[in-house]
Amino acid sequence: MTSPIKKSSTQTLKKSNPGGAKRKAPAFRSAYSRAELEEIFRRFSIQRPEPKGELEHVNPFTLVVAVALSAQATDAGVNKATRALFKVADTPQKMLDLGEEKVRDYIKTIGLYRNKAKNVIALSQRLVDVYGGEVPKTREELVTLPGVGRKTANVVMSMAFGIPTIAVDTHILRIANRIRLAPGKTPDEVEDKLLKIIPKHWLFHAHHWLILHGRYCCKARRPECERCVIADVCKSGEKTCDVPAPLVELPQQIIGATE
């Protein structure tokens, strides 16, 4: 008696998945419940009611320049270099009049300053030629400026125009993974997940709360869990303390302070 022919695994797969349609990846679920997410940002709001970015600027243009210069550099280092620069060139046209060589001289203490000076001149030229010297408000337009990527565009949209965004820098990328808030391998992946889980009414300040938490408390080398206001809620495998720090408002930020 001949044995029945076994169906190949491919045949079985086709039967269970007619047409070979791709299966959707499971929807992302944070390690935190909605109540826990609400509590995290509620505490951040008490600790820092009006969080601010720490790059010094006087208008949307100088903000674009400052954020573009901050790539692979500290805010304190950028501020030190741009204070004098922005006194003489606070508009795209003034920056063009200054010229690339002089821009280089102002920012030579910042890493990659030669390439960054080229970008500053190029983005200033595009702002004059295409946008009448004004900084555009949309991400799609901002990322067309030389030296401006998605993170820079998000920062400008938030800080200059009050549009709620999440700009994922090294601090946010680190703590989103460390505390399992929105794990992801890339800034874009983390941004997408954070936008899905952060309660909408906390979204406007969430970007700065997370950056400042990562910069001053959940630090890269060693998280200072004993100073953390969400230590009891945190789900990090690295945490060393389960007792939250006293929930009090911190002193007002001094923009330009060293990190």
Image (cartoon, helix red, strand yellow):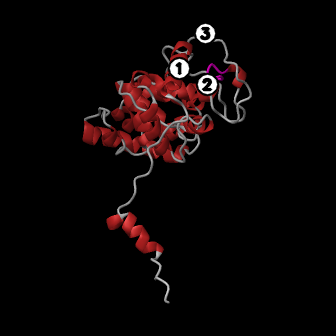
Q: As shown in the figure, which amino acid type bears the numbered disc 3?
A: Val
Disc nearer the start of the sequence (1/3): 1
Residue at the (69%, 36%) spot, across then down: 237
Q: Check the image and report above or below for 184 versus 79.
A: below
Whole-number angstrom distance, CA of label 2 to CA of label 1: 8 Å
Q: Position of residue 205 (x, y in %)?
A: 45, 23
The mark found on residue 233 in the picture is 2
For label 2, the SS is loop
Going from the N terminus, do you reach mark 3 or mark 2 first? 2
Verify CB contact (< 8 Å) between mark 2 and mark 1: yes
Pointers 1 and 3 in contact (CB under 8 A)? no
Q: CA distance from mark 1 to mark 3?
A: 15 Å
Q: Is residue 230 magenta?
A: yes
Instruction: Give me the C-alpha separation between circle 3 and circle 2.
Output: 17 Å
The answer to whether residue 246 shows anywhere in this view is yes
Crowding at dot 2, Cα within 10 Å, few <14 / some 14-19 / many 20+, comes out as some
Residue 47, quarter of picture: top right
The residue segment tinted magenta is 228-232
Disc 3: which residue? 248
Give the structural element (helix, strand or loop) at label 1.
Answer: helix
Q: Nearer the viewer, mark 3 or mark 2?
A: 2
Q: Position of residue 24 (x, y in %)?
A: 40, 53
Residue at (60, 9) in percent of width and height: 248
Closer to the camera in the image, 252 or 258: 252
Q: Earlier in the sequence, mark 2 or mark 1?
A: 1
Residue 51 vs residue 3, the one in the foreground: 3
Q: What amino acid is at disc 1?
A: Glu
Residue identified by numbered label 1: 39
Q: Amino acid at mark 2?
A: Val
